[in-house]
Amino acid sequence: MILSTTPTRPTTTLTINTNTSEHRRHILQILTQCTSISQLKQVHAYTLRTTPLDHPDALFLYSRILHFASMNDLDYSFKLFGNLENPNSFIWNTLIRGCAHSNDRKGEAFLLFQRMVKSVEPDKHTFPFVLKGCAYLFALSEGKQAHGVAVKLGFDSDVYVNNSLIHFYSSCGCLKDARKVFDEMPERSLVSWNVMIDALVQSGEFENALRMFSEMQKVFEPDGYTMQSVLDACAGLGALSLGIWGHAYILRRYESFLDFDLLVNNCLLNMYCKCGSVDIAVQVFERMNRRDLNSWNTMILGFAMHGEVEAAFRCFNQMVSKRLMPDSITFVGILSACNHRGLVDEGRSYFDKMVSEYKIRPVLEHYGCLVDLLARAGCIDKALDVVSNMPMKPDAAIWRSLLDGCCKKNADIEFSEEVARKIMESEGSDTSGVYVLLSRVYATANRWDEAGMIRKLMTDKGIRKDPGCSLIEINGVFHEFFTGDTSHLHTREIYEFLDVIEKRLKAAGYVPDLSHING
C-alpha cells in the first residue's frame, strides 16, 4: 500500500503483506506512521477493502483507526462509528474521550454516555471521560447521573473514578460533595490529594488546603502540581514564611525543576507579589528561562498592587517590545497602577489604547478601575459619564467607588443618596458599608443631624460595620483576629501587650493617619 502525501513532501511507500496472519500487524504498523488525517483515510479505505466486518480482527482494527481519528477529526470519527456494528466499550470510550478533550463538542460526551448505557455496560475508563466533559460545562445534574451509574456498577471504589468525581464536584462548586467522595475513598493516590487540595484552594479555603497538605505529607511526597496549589494557598493567606519554605522545598527536592516548569515559576511570582515581597518576585522573574503572558501579567499586577507604578509601566513596555500582545488582565493591572497614583490622564490614555490599538473589549473590571480612578480624583461628573455609557449594568463596587468619591468632594446630597440606593439594590441585605459611607457624605457636608440619623438607623436595625480582620502565621499555625475580638483564650494578656506597644509608639512620636478610616 502507498500512502500519498502532499506534493512538497517525498512520497512514503509502505508495502502491506495481505497474508491473513500478518494482516493485523501490518495495518497497526502503518497506522503508527500516519501523519495526517488524509493518510488515515487511506488506511481506512485499505482496511475496508481487505478486512470484512465479519473478520476476527475487524472490530479491533476499526477501533484503532477510530482511536487515531478521534485525536484529529471528530466528524470523521463519528462517521466511522456510525458504520460499526455492536461497538464495544473501548470504541464508545474512544469517542467519548474525543468529545471530552475537544474544544467545542464536550457536551456530546454525556449524550454518547446515555446512548452507551443502553447497549454496552460502561467500564471504569468510561467515567473519567464523561465527568471531564460535565465538569467543563458545569453540568451538575448530568454528572450526578454518571456518578449514580458508577455506584450501581461498583466503580465507586475505583481510585481513578473517584479522582474524576472530586474534580467534577469541585468544578461545579460542590465542595462538600467533593470532600465526601475524598473522605470515603478506600484508596487514595497522590492525584487524589492533589485534586482535593486544589479544590480547596480554588474555593478560597486556603487554611484547610494547607492542613490537608500537611496530612498528605505523611503518606506521599508532593510533586510539582502539589506545590502549585500550596503556593497559591500561601498567596491567598499572605503566608510569606510558608511560601518561602515551599520555594526552598522545590529547590531542594527537584534541583533544576524551576528551570523548566513555567507553571510553578508563575505560582512563585504570584505568591511573592501577594505576600508583599515584590523584590523577590523580580529575582524569580529575571531568572526564568521562559515566560508567558501570565508571567508578565503577574508582575504588572504585583507592581500595581504595591504602588510601584513606574515599574508596572516599564514591565508593560518590555512585554510589548518582545512582541507579546497584552490581554484584558494586562490592562486591569495597568489601570490599577494608574489608580494607585491618581494618574487620571494616563489611565484614560491606556483605556483608549486598549480599545483602539489592541482591540480589547472593556469588561466590568476595566470600567471599575476607570470609575474609581476618576472618583478618587474628584471627577464625579466624568465618572458618572463613564457609568452612564457602559454597555453593561454597573455592579455594587462601581457604585461604591462613586459614593466614596462623593465623600471626598462635597458632592450633591441627593445624588449621593441615589447612589446609595443603587448599592442597596445591588447588594441586598449586605448594606453596612453603604450606611457608613452615606454618614460620611453627610458629615463632610456638615449635615450632622442626617449623619446622626444614619448612625441611629444602623443601631435600631442592628446593622454593624464589618470589623477589620488580621491574620498572622506563627510556626505554621494561622491566627485570625477581628477588631474588638475577645474570643481568644489569652485576650487579657494580648490587650495588655497592645497597650504597651501603643504607649511605646506614642513615646516615639508616632501619629496614626486616620484620614482613610470609614466611620
Image (cartoon, grey):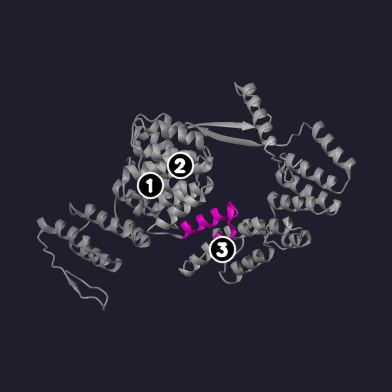
Residue 35 falls in image quadrant? bottom left
Label 1 environment density (alpha carbons within 10 Å; few <14, some 14–19, many ≥20): many
Dot 1: what SS?
helix
Residue 437 falls in image quadrant? top right
| Residue 307 is covered by the magenta coloring | yes
Whether pointer 3 and pointer 2 mark residues with C-beta atoms closer than 8 Å, the reply is no
Residue at the (29%, 48%) spot, across then down: 90
Residue extending farthest front: 508
**Vertical relation: 359 (above or below) 243:** below
Q: Position of residue 479 (x, y in %)?
A: 55, 31
* 3 or 1: mark nearer the eye: 3
- Say whether disc 2 or disc 1 marks the residue closer to the N-terminus: 1
Residue of label 3: 313
* 2 or 1: mark nearer the eye: 2
Dot 2: what SS?
helix
Q: Magenta segment range?
A: 293-313
Whether pointer 3 and pointer 1 mark residues with C-beta atoms closer than 8 Å, the reply is no
Residue type marked 3: Phe
- Say whether disc 3 or disc 2 marks the residue closer to the N-terminus: 2
Front residue (pair 503, 393): 503
- Say whether disc 3 or disc 1 marks the residue closer to the N-terminus: 1
Residue of label 2: 243
Front residue (pair 392, 341): 341
Q: Position of residue 162 (x, y in %)?
A: 39, 37
Residue type marked 2: Gly
Q: Position of residue 400 (x, y in %)?
A: 72, 49
Residue of label 1: 129
